[in-house]
Amino acid sequence: MCMEGKWIWLSSKEHPDFQAAPFTVFSKDKNAGKYCVAEFSNRYRLRKKVLFYKISIAAMSKYFLWVNDDYIGEGCSCPGHENGRDEKAEKAYYTVYTLPPKGDTLSIRVLVRNMPTSKFESSCGTGALILSCEIVYDDGMSEVIFTDDTWDARILGRYVSENHIDYTIEDTAPSKAEVKNIRLDIKDSQLQCLTEEKVLPQRNDVFVCPAGIEAVFSVEFGKIWSSHVCLSAVGEDYELTIGTSESGDNLQSEEVIRAKGRLQFRSMNLRSADRVVVKVKNLSDTEVRISDVQLDYVHYPSLTRASFATSDEELNRIWSLCTHTDTICRQSVLLDSVLKGNAFDRIGEKRVQALNEYYVFGDTALAKSDIIKTAEIIDSSDGQMNDTVSPLIWVMMLWDYYVYTGDSRLFDDTKNAQVKIISEFQSYLGTNGLPEKCRDYSSVDKVVIDGFDMMHPPKALGQAVLTAFYINALNILSKISSVTEDDKLGIMSRRAQSTAVHAFNTNFYDSINNLYFAGLGTQTRNVSSRNPENVNRKYYIRHPNILAVLFDICRSENVASIVSNVVKNPDLGPVQPYFMNYMLEMLFKTGDFNSYGIDIIRRWSALIDSQGKALSENWGDYPGDFSHASSTCPSYALVKAFLGFEMTKPGFEEIRVSPNLFGLESVNVSMPTPYGSIECKMRKGKEPKMMVPGGIKCVVVR
């Protein structure tokens, strides 16, 4: 369905102070606009019987939609931008809702927040709404209604700021909306609508605050949920401060509500919440009662999902919490975490989520959307992203998508980004064939080595990792050129790869220790907070050695020794859950997962909090949160491992499975595919029972 609506906003004559808005939350312009929530509405009398409505909607920067007095859902255009970049939105993406009729009228009401309040939202510099509704009648006819200057518009005065709501402030008088000449490339997001579920607390009590005092109470929900806080209140005059926490007593967010009388409250802000704390300030001579504290759990829907149930409760708990953590980060984009709200900051973390999308949720839409949006960022930035390694890992995401779907069309659609990545990274190379002229060597992992944060390491700790990802990207681009029959790309990438492999082995390999060190100790260019002054020292750490094996950079005769060192040698330093994904991929590749993989995954038990309801982002003292999808690789890894799954031809044209109990008593595991689920039931001492959908050529190895 084409978007036939017109962009509308508040009348510039009636509301001159609310016409401008910052592009992102990173704007430094304090005069970019005043915050508001605008309401747009219209009502239509229907003269024939309706089969269904199909509503397409987008907004700058977030909308909440009601149809016929029923709440339908929320969304934002989310065109895609990097953390820290204050760039004007040039695109918008609309969402489509298909709804049944209700009565003989159609009423539409939309609340629009005029400026970004999350890192993944963006704006074209003004609040705006565009909507079209196709009405399909039972006689086969249809008509389209859309936003225009017949819609009513007003400011809801209660919304003072993102975190301050005052119900004692009146709304403005309705006036007609104004059509805006907004030039944006608007596209169908091709994503499903976000789904919402009510989550009740472990105890659903009524809380009473006596007259004239302040009181505090808290409500627990048993897990962290990506959610909007809801509650009911009644009192003569009161102020509520509503805080949320992922784990423990530290509140990550607060919003203040002033009200008189009866209140039904639903926060507009998406929170990462296991615990809600409400501070009540009773400003009257009668009691205030708070009840029905709930969460509206918001996430991207999944029609299918992997299953994993074994006789080992530790592994079951790890899989369950990893999968739940990944689920709450599935929004209109793959967020790194609900708390931090980064969407395109570090693509390595997004790749972990994309692998879960394929092998746990059996869904490609979110990953595909993010691959395309990331390509647009890379293309517009001439091959760069804030995180230097991210464009190279994006190439891995592009190939992962092809392997799972067999769909090569994205290769052509993202060709500009591919070519610009090669060009940009070749400009970094010094005479030794290694990255010497890059802005920095960010990022490697969330660990501190020798006082250096490996998210922004010096060259001596980051150069080999960046080079390894560059080599792998060139290898993938060579394979892409074979699929697309692009000889020019193939020749360019193969030559560059051969040169880079030689430089990597010549400069980083230590034949005495049979290990690669992490980078050269030579002088660094462009010293900055992200690119520290280099140190003249050889560091032997796990990260470049994992990648040297995974990406086929090292000689085959050295693989076994390097793998043994990477897994067993305590002197090689720590690896956090994010980078551990590459460790597990390395073990799958070399066939050593059977020996080491399950024991490594058991380390995730140390990430689970004492109450077993949240998964920490990192091991040790490195700061993090409890809703971070970068730590969820066991979700897909356990499913693949117990099935012994391998894609031998892209798009499930041919697969190989080798079921493995790994010493357990019993395992039931399933993995969604485009053809249905692969299922396996295993019991100790018995032959595995495999079910593979028709349409998939499967080789079973016992």
Image (cartoon, rainbow, N blue to C red):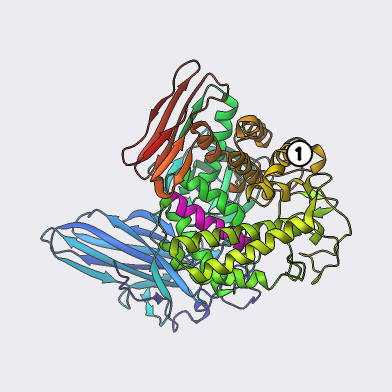
Q: Nearer the viewer, residue 388 or 564?
A: 564
Q: Residue at x 79, y 43 (%)?
A: 573
Compared to residue 300, the image places residue 470 above or below, namely: below
Q: Position of residue 569 (x, y in %)?
A: 79, 37
- In the picture, measured across the screen, residue 524 lies left or right of residue 52, that is right
Please tell me whether residue 395 belongs to the stretch shown in magenta: yes
Q: Image height check: is 17 above or below 685?
A: below
Kindly identify which residue carries mark 1. Answer: 565
Q: Secondary structure at mark 1?
A: helix
* Nearer the observer, 363 or 205: 363
- Secondary structure character of the magenta stretch overall: helix
Residue 474 position (above or below residue 641) = below
Dot 1 crowding, Cα within 10 Å, few <14, some 14–19, many 20+:
many
Residue visible at 58% across and 66% down in the picture: 493
Could you tell me residue 43's position as x and y percent? 27, 66
In the rendered view, does 654 fall on the left or right side of 444?
A: left
Task: Find residue 47 and report its horizontal and vertical position in percent.
Answer: 13, 64
Q: Which of 318/423 is in front?
A: 423
Whether residue 284 can be seen here: yes
Disc tally is: 1
- Residue furthest to the top in view is 685
Write the residue at 63% across / 66% down. Answer: 496
Residue 552 x, y percent position in the rendering: 64, 50
Residue at the image point whose x is 59% and y is 35% from the top: 613
Q: Which amino acid type corresponds to the residue marked 1 in the rendered image?
A: Asn
Whether the magenta-drawn stretch holds residue 309 is answered as no
The magenta-colored residue range is: 387-404
**Rendered-image quadrant of the N terminus:** bottom left
Residue 466, picture quadrant: bottom right
Locate residue 39: give its quadrant: bottom left
